Image: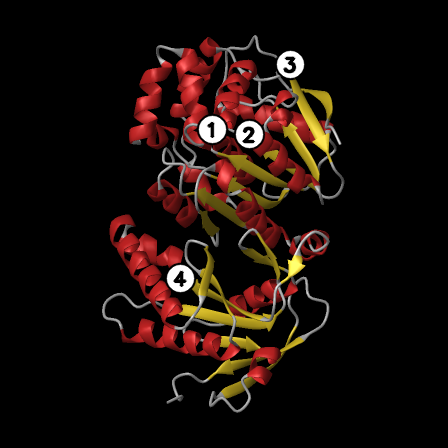
Amino acid sequence: MEPEIRYARTSDGVNIAYATLGQGSPIVVVAGSMSHVQIEWAQPTLRRAYGLLAAHHTLIRFDHRGLGLSDREVDDFSLETRLRDIEAVVTAAGCTRFILTGTQHGGLAAIAYAARHPEAISRLILTDAFSSGEERVKTPQGQAMAELLKGDWEMWTENVGALALGWGREESRLFGQFVRAAVAGDAYRRMFEDLVHTDVTELLPMIAAPTLIVKHSGIEYVSMEMTRRLASGIANAKLVVVEGKLTEAVDQVQAAVDEFLGDAPAIVRERSGSSTPSSLRTVLFTDLVGHTEMMSRLGDARGRDVLREHERITREVLKANGGTEVKTMGDGFMASFGSVTKAVECAVALQRAFVEREGEPLNVRVGLNAGEPIEEDGDLFGATVILASRIAAKADGGEILVADTVRGLCSGKGFLFADRGDFVAKGIEEPVRISAVNWRSQT
């Protein structure tokens, strides 16, 4: 299905092109510093990412003034004008309450809009975003690209594709062509100057919507320190770190978005037609409680050292107990086990390792569930995984909660359990009995 392209008119008389795709609750996408709602559909990575979002939502993309199919003969690219562009599009599309996403530079306008219109935003998703344009351009890659931008426009566009998508890729070269079609060099230079001087840090505490922050480890011109400051500035924001560049993490990002939006059960049912269930697996989730507060209290450098210690301990204990790391989510892990006994032993060993270490306390909660998840490209999906994640989220710091299936399979294995009653998990139709592992009493 191809997107439908229409126009909205801003309060200051600028025509803004926008495109809609799919059906369901609306998601408004604020792209980075370049977009073209028509030809970006030919970019494989963008097409795949947008197609996944449109599977269960009405996806609304638009070109800011000066970009793509919108009016290009404009001189003012300030934050205020970008907010007018968003307002015109959501009004024309008939959106009164919607999910808002902002990518990289687009995160600046998305943050400002969410802060000023809390009643309109049901969820906020920020991908490789930051709150200060000046801070972004001061990274080593940002400084190099800013200097290059002053001179050779074509070389700059070619390097943008490589930095975002990876060096030596055909798609990176094509992305350079896309950028040149999306915006003129002189216009982008003026636009970039406005973006560099945009700072929305003071607006972060005003965001009321549940927020997901996604960081690609391979996008080096948005540093992890910038990402952590962004996450710590928004109350209860969830941070997910995925490995690689944009082309290498589409599925991981979508899994995080599915989970955040509550779409995971529907997505899993759709994927299950082309994927095969694995054998019985026990899925373990961990989550570092109070991560954002710890980073704020200790500062970026010391906080990151503590986080590395958490990662080191987790990986060592997983390896010692036969666990397979599926992915890390910044402040937590997802792992799988072929043996339910090994999974529970690993959970106990993790808690003991965190308690016994010296220094900053690591308060970690753990949740486990057993079943037959869907395996696809090294990742696991399905109700088994979703329930394990929900159980982990229900646990307190230092606690291990397990589904009734795990407790039953561990019968007679020497573990001590305390019944916690029925648990109704979001996205799961039937209530699930859960128990806590009394690991402190276990010999």
Sequence-first tag of 1 and 3: 3
Query: In the structure shown, which secondary structural element does the residue marked by tag 4 occupy?
Result: loop
Residue 377 horizontal/vertical position (percent): 56, 51
Amino acid carrying label 2: it is Ala
The kind of residue on which mark 4 rests is Gly
| 10 Å crowding of disc 4: few (<14), some (14-19), many (20+) | some
Label 4, label 3: how many angstroms apart (C-alpha)? 47 Å
Q: CA distance from mark 1 to mark 2?
A: 22 Å
Residue 185 seen by the camera: yes
| Residue named by callout 2 | 31
- Quote the CA–CA distance across marks 2 and 3: 21 Å
Residue 243 rendering spot, x and y as whole percentages = 43, 46
Q: In terms of sequence position, does the residue under pointer 2 or pointer 3 come before the other? A: 3
The residue at the point 54 percent across, 76 percent down is 402
- Residue 255: give x, y in percent of width and height: 58, 51
Residue 290: image tag: 4
Pointer 1 residue: 169
Residue annotated with mark 3: 13
